[in-house]
Image (cartoon, helix red, strand yellow):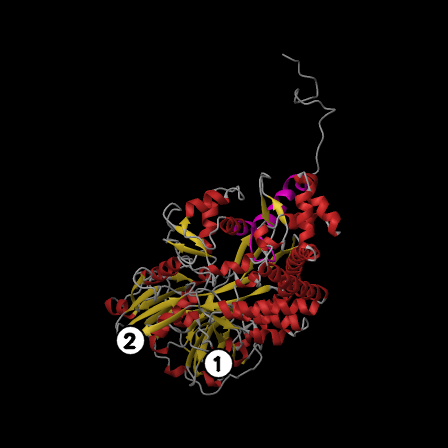
Amino acid sequence: MAKRKKGNENPLINESEATLQPITETLKQNYMPYAMSVIVSRAIPEIDGFKPAHRKLLYTMYTMGLMTAQKTKSANIVGQTMRLNPHGDASIYETMVRLTRGNAALLHPFVDSKGSFGKHYSRDMAYAASRYTEAKLDPFCAELFNGIDKDAVDFIPNYDNTMKEPSLLPTTFPNILVTPNLGIAVGMACSICSFNLAEICDGTIALLKNPKTTIERFMDIVKGPDFSGGGTIIYDYEQMKKIYLTGTGSFKMQAKYKYNPKEHCIDIYEIPYSAFIEPIIKKAKDMMNSGKLKEVAAVQDAVDITESKLIYIELKKDANPDIVMQKLLSTTDLQCNFDCNFNILVDGKPVTLGIREILLEWIRFRSKCLTRELTFTLNKKKDKLHLLQGLAKLLVDIDKAIRIIRGTENEEDVVPNLAKAFDITDIQAEYIAEIKLRHLNRQYIINRMKEFDQLEKDIAELGAILKDEIKLKELIISQLKEIKKKYAQERRTTFIEKENVQKVDKEEIFFENYNCRLVFTKGGYFKKLSMQSVRASDEQKLKEGDYIIYEEDTDNKGDVLFVTDKCHIYRAKVSDFDLTKPSSMGDYIPTKLSMEDDEHVVACKMIYDIIPEHHMVYIFENGKGVRIPMGSYDAKSKRKKITGAYSSSSPLVAAFYEGDKPIQIFLRSDTGRGILCKSSLIAEKSTRTSSGVQIMQFSKKKGKIEFATDRISDLGADISKCHKTVLPSTGSIINQLTFNF
């Protein structure tokens, strides 16, 4: 065994050979090629509207003759496609499923199918195995391959270099915006919604006539996305304009439904394109189980029952269908966003373009394809004309040609002899030599001369088109008009203006109101009790030495204000607290509302809203008091915490809420004197931090207020002698107090 060298921890590594590679180099050499392969060869569509997997499948079906032949087993198609696509039969079949008429994912399906191919709106409805289903190309595919045999696009070797495949398909319409496309690459993704074929054809024609067509005019022509599953787009003009200009953004979609009064049910018959029925049904059932959808008796998948609806919702007797749909639209994918990210490949490079720019790129692409196709046709006609020109020279003296052929000893000399005798090319001579003797009749000669004239005319027309960009555009326009005439469909997706959509407050529609009793103790414990539990037992469980300082019968709809000794007011909804029983301690408010460690609640009051004319009354230890209008606490947003609610110049003893009428307040000092007065006697100050005015005077400036309450009826002692009508006052002696709290 080799001895380990001193200082070298790994004897298998030669220190002179050990090198470190920067992470950037590793990424560049290993990760970037993979990332670019995914972007270019898998996930992002090109200007013809197809990803490589789609293109390979459709071209294979085209070469199999499935444009005109009868349907064949899908397994056969998948097997043939593997000559171009090495990624396995399962992924090829999944690609095919989405393109079929049966799956209903596309406005214009490319594959005419037979058998079960699932549905794009169902996550659980599985498609049948490829050995059971059959397919062929839909007649619509003629628009994909028009010109492919006339050099319209480049052909490239397949993955094992045994055959050729088209790099793009020469689509005669902007398929990139008619067929929806979703894809996730490395570091980028695409999400292209589908548009109505007729509108896209009209929009493209408008750009062919005027490339500077304004976005406003363009949006009048191409009104918006159109999906095979229908649904409704909540139309926001500015947001849609952004998508048209930049290719990014989102719009909101919602389901279509109708109420059936005879059966007292709701039929949902169209859902947003990106939604699935199973999660919607599951969410609805979860809401039923949790009590948030009490109006519904049952929710069912109706796809297998009838094609006219997707989801069936059975309502209870007194249920309001509008409220039910508001709840479902606000919580399920019956209303959801479609995110747009128009990433496409142009000349092999990923770019994000708006709709106009995509169509202008398609026009450039289509012009190139059509130019190549016309050039191919022109050359073929020129070749044919060249042959007929040679025939014309021969027709001057057919007998001479016959003599030359008869007089030639060797067959291989026939063509050179004819070429020399009539001053024609070898190609022309070969054509003439192959003419059968039976064709040298008057009718044949007349037909060839007519063909000669037609070829000259066709060549002139083709040459004129190729030289004139306007004529080339006119040809594209005529093709688009023909496509629109043959394949146009009515819009399936409708629009509703954003302003016409009822705004739904989720808290309001899910809110459950009921009567309850609120209880708050001096120790900071808060209870929300149902009236049923109050009737069953009115005895409250409290900590030893604790007592109730606030108790009120109300409902679940209001807010509770908690005034603390740190000059803060906390605001919480009554509905935020769970119902409890009298035998429970309740919620400890400093913990529930995340107050400071040494912060304690001094007072509590339930309100429905801040009424500016009402007041908060504060009593301070130094004998001062103040009334602050509630308008000083008003704000557009209901803040959960109001800081600086009152003056910090003296410790707060108590706080009270004064409504429409003044309240009676009893104060007692540590010197045994008490005051009973109306809250209206305490001066009002509009500034929240006002220190107030003196309401209780102390002899020799010694003493402080130690207790204050508005629960006069719960005081066991006779305090009528403490009643005062003028403040400030030293109060009346009342050494003993008993409480019925």
Query: Callout 2 environment at 10 Å: few (<14), some (14 to 19), or many (20+)?
Result: few
Residue 53 among magenta residues: yes
Mark 2 vs mark 1: give the one in front. Answer: 2
Residue 37 among magenta residues: yes
Identify residue for label 1: 615
Report whether residue 30 is seen.
yes
On-image quarter of the C terminus: bottom left
Q: Which image quarter: residue 123?
A: bottom left
- Which residue does the image show at 38% across and 46% down from the upper left? 129
Seen from the viewer's position, the closer of residues 396 and 673 is 396
Q: Which image quarter: residue 415?
A: top right
Q: Is residue 717 left or right of residue 421?
A: left
Identify residue for label 2: 261
Query: Callout 1 environment at 10 Å: few (<14), some (14 to 19), or many (20+)?
Result: many
The span shown in magenta is: 27-55
Q: Are marks 2 and 1 in contact (CB under 8 Å)?
A: no
Which residue sits furthest bottom? 725
Seen from the viewer's position, the closer of residues 7 and 281 is 281
Type of amino acid under label 2: Pro
Q: Which image quarter: residue 351?
A: bottom right
- Which residue does the image show at 53% across and 50% down from the upper left? 59
In the image, which disc is placed on residue 437?
none
How many marks can you see? 2
* Percent of width and height locating residue 681: 48, 85
Q: Main secondary structure of the magenta part?
A: helix
Type of amino acid under label 1: His
